[in-house]
């Protein structure tokens, strides 16, 4: 029993010792692991702190370098500005020195000129004194020789000049009176004839406006079209301004060219009657109408030659005669003027015993040079003579055409007859208006100026010359060139032409693609 207890106690002791050592070993292992973990954590914290310190250092270094660079840049800029200021100061100093030298030079020149003038003034004073002395001596000698005093001599001289002036004045007055008596009868007749002419029936003249009457104002909206497409297409095709306002049952066609107005009027009439009004139809109708007007021009020429009894005229001359209907000279209808001149020439030639048919022929064709298809830089009389020669007219007729404004020498008796009859037809009061002619010439010059630029296809002067529409070819001018072209045209108009107000230049470039479905 006791042994058992002892063995048990011994076992407990041995177990306790063994447990103690086991626990001690286990605790040592845990402590070692904790120490290692603590060491690892310490190393990690150390590395992190080192990294943070390095990063902070690098950031501070970068900021410092940036500040240094900015300061260096500011210093450099300040040095550059200082250098520029110094350079400008040097330039100013050089300019001031040059100006000072120039002023000194001019001052020296002025001093020299002043000194020279003073010397000349002294010489002039001396000469004047000597002249006065000599004049006084001469006057005293003359008074001694004539036995008169100076005042008496002056009085006699004045009286003599007065008598001479009176004599010359009376002779001039008598001459003027004689001339007035000679011309009084002629002047009285002229005044009487002019007075009779002024109270005669007024002759109708061409103007720049045609009124197109419509049945109702509903047609105006169709003519204008959606967003104005129809009226813009009509204006572009005809070159005539279409004015649609509040005037009841009327549309105004405005344009300085009667041919264009007639084409626009006929085309508009056909469109209104037909009822189909759209841009494509408008272009088609205008093209047909233009052809009809050309045919009508030929017919007018034929009727004119038949009415006047002129035969054997070349077809081209007949066409040009018909074209006269749509031209004016100083506001006077050119065809009416040509017919008047032809009839007057026939009457005067018959009275003088000359050939009235030739005279009538020359009178009709004398202004043919105003309506050619091309416009060469020649006087219309010379151009008309060249056309007459080209189409085999008689030499005396050609000479009468070319000499009616003294452009060439008169070689036949028909020439002075045509010249006089042309003056008679144009001299009627109310026959011509130079203002209208100048206006038309200005518009023609405006269109021709724009037409001279490359790529320009058509030009239309509208709004009484206040706007110029220029149509260019899409294949010849690009979009960038359009703006430059409008500026160049405006600059040239401003430099070379005289006009009231301002002129608006609109350059239009349009591209169309047409295909047909068959």
Image (cartoon, grey):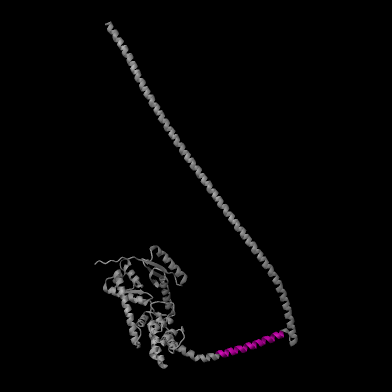
Main SS of residues in magenta: helix
Q: Residue furthest left?
A: 518
* Residue 392, x across and y down, in percent: 38, 84
The structure residue drawn at horizontal position 68% and vertical position 66%, both measured from the top left corner, is: 112
Question: In the figure, is residue 516 to the left or right of 455?
Answer: left
Task: Mark yes or no: residue 162 visible.
Answer: yes
Does the segment drawn in magenta span residue 460? no
Residue 287 higher or lower than 24, as above or below: below
Q: Which residues are magenta?
A: 151-176
* Residue 391, x across and y down, in percent: 38, 83
Question: In the figure, is residue 18 to the left or right of 431?
Answer: left
Question: In the figure, is residue 107 to the left or right of 413?
Answer: right
* Residue 76, x across and y down, in percent: 53, 47
Which image quarter: residue 318?
A: bottom left
Q: 132 or 283: which is nearer to us?
A: 283
The structure residue drawn at horizontal position 47% and vertical position 86%, both measured from the top left corner, is: 409
């Amino acid at each position: 029993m006791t042994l058992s207890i002892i063995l048990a106690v011994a076992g407990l002791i041995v177990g306790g010792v063994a447990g103690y050592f086991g626990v001690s070993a286990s605790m040592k292992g845990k402590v070692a692991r904790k120490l290692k973990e603590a060491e690892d954590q310490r190393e990690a914290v150390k590395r992190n702190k080192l990294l943070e310190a390095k990063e902070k250092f690098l950031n501070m270094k970068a900021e410092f370098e940036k500040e240094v660079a900015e300061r260096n840049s500011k210093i450099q800029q300040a040095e550059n500005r200082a250098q520029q200021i110094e350079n400008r100061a040097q330039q100013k100093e050089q300019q001031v020195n040059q100006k000072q030298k120039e002023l000194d030079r001019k001052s020296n020149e002025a001093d020299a000129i002043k000194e020279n003038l003073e010397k000349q003034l002294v010489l002039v004073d001396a000469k004047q004194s000597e002249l006065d002395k000599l004049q006084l001596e001469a006057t005293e000698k003359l008074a001694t020789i004539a036995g008169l005093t100076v005042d008496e001599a002056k009085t006699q001289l004045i009286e003599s000049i007065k008598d001479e002036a009176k004599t010359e004045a009376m002779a001039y007055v008598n001459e003027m009176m004689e001339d007035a008596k000679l011309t009084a009868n002629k002047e009285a007749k002229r005044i009487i004839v002019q007075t009779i002419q002024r109270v005669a029936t007024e002759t109708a003249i061409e103007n720049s406006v045609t009124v197109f009457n419509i049945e109702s104002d509903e047609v105006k909206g169709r003519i204008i079209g959606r967003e104005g497409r129809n009226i813009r297409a009509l204006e572009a095709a005809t070159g005539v301004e279409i004015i649609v306002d509040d005037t009841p049952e009327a549309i105004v066609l405005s344009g300085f060219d009667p041919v264009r107005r007639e084409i626009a009027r006929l085309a508009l009439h056909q469109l209104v009657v037909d009822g189909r009004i759209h841009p494509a139809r408008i272009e088609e109708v205008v093209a047909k109408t233009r052809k009809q007007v050309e045919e009508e021009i030929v017919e007018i020429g034929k009727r004119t030659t038949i009415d006047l009894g002129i035969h054997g005229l070349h077809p081209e001359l007949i066409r040009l005669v018909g074209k006269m209907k749509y031209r004016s000279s100083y506001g006077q209808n050119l065809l009416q003027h040509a017919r008047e001149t032809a009839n007057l020439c026939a009457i005067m030639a018959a009275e003088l015993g000359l050939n009235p048919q030739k005279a009538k022929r020359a009178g009709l064709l004398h202004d043919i040079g105003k309506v050619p298809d091309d416009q060469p830089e020649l006087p219309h009389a010379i151009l008309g003579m060249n056309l007459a020669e080209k189409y085999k007219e008689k030499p005396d007729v050609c000479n009468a055409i070319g000499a009616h404004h003294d452009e060439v020498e008169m070689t036949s008796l028909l020439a002075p007859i045509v010249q006089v009859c042309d003056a008679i037809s144009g001299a009627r009061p109310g026959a011509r208006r130079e203002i209208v002619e100048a206006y038309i010439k200005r518009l023609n010059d405006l269109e021709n100026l724009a037409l001279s630029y490359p790529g320009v296809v058509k030009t239309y002067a509208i709004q009484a010359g206040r706007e110029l529409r220029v149509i260019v070819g899409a294949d010849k001018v690009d979009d960038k060139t359009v703006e430059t072209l409008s500026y160049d045209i405006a600059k040239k108009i401003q430099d070379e032409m005289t006009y009231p107000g301002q002129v608006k230049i609109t350059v239009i470039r349009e591209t169309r693609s047409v295909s047909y479905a068959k």
